[in-house]
Image (cartoon, helix red, strand yellow):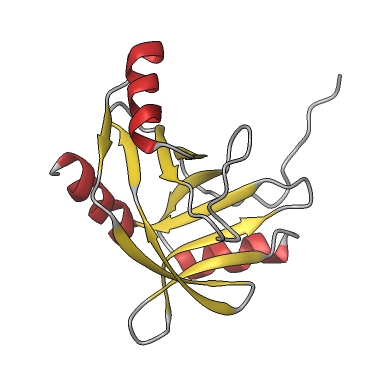
Amino acid sequence: MSPITVSDFLDLGLLHHIGIVVDDIEAAAQHFAHTYGLTVSLADESTYRCRIDGMENTTVQRLGMTVAGPPHVELLRAVPGSPVWQPVPGVHHIGFVVDDLARASEELARRGSPMWMGGVRGDGCPAGTAYHRDRFGLTVELLDSATEKRLAARFFGK
């Protein structure tokens, strides 16, 4: 078996979280605590504005995050009718915190993983997150450091 070499390295840093969409977020949090010994901090519902394939979208979402980590396990409540938050077996996405969201997002797109969805600020500008899909179907979430800090404050009071 020969090693795969990386000729043009893109530093995404360490894996921050693995996202899983679930039908019942409270039951999933209890399952992770009982089965795996992982404490999950559940946040209140919040509104998430984003663009999906270029179209504006607003969703009310509820998240949970394991206290242990990174990497954390992120639980995302399924949203009926949403093109994004549907429960499917296995991992929904993996997430990385990056120093320069725009640069990392552009580089992933250049390497063949186009942006599929991204967060939107009140003025309509991209903000905080960018979701990319690769040719194997993996979704990668890039978070800027300000978004990661907001998540840490929301879930862990940090």
- Relative to 63, is 49 above or below? below
- Relative to 68, is 148 above or below? below
Q: Residue at x 59, y 52 (%)?
A: 10
Q: For the view shown, which residue lies furthest in the bottom direction?
A: 123
Q: Residue at x 31, y 52 (%)?
A: 148
Q: Residue at x 37, y 28 (%)?
A: 27
Give the left or right position of residue 98, taking residue 148 as reference.
Answer: right
Q: Position of residue 74 (x, y in %)?
A: 41, 39
> The N terminus is located in which quarter?
top right
Q: Position of residue 47 (x, y in %)?
A: 33, 65
Front-most of 127 and 29?
Answer: 29
Q: For the view shown, which residue lies furthest in the front direction?
A: 80
> The C terminus is located in which quarter?
top left
Q: Position of residue 44 (x, y in %)?
A: 23, 50
- Relative to 49, is 37 above or below? above
Q: For the view shown, which residue lies furthest in the left direction?
A: 157
Q: Residue at x 36, y 33 (%)?
A: 70
Front-most of 143 and 110?
Answer: 143
Q: Position of residue 11 (x, y in %)?
A: 53, 49
Exactly how many numbered labels are in the figure?
0
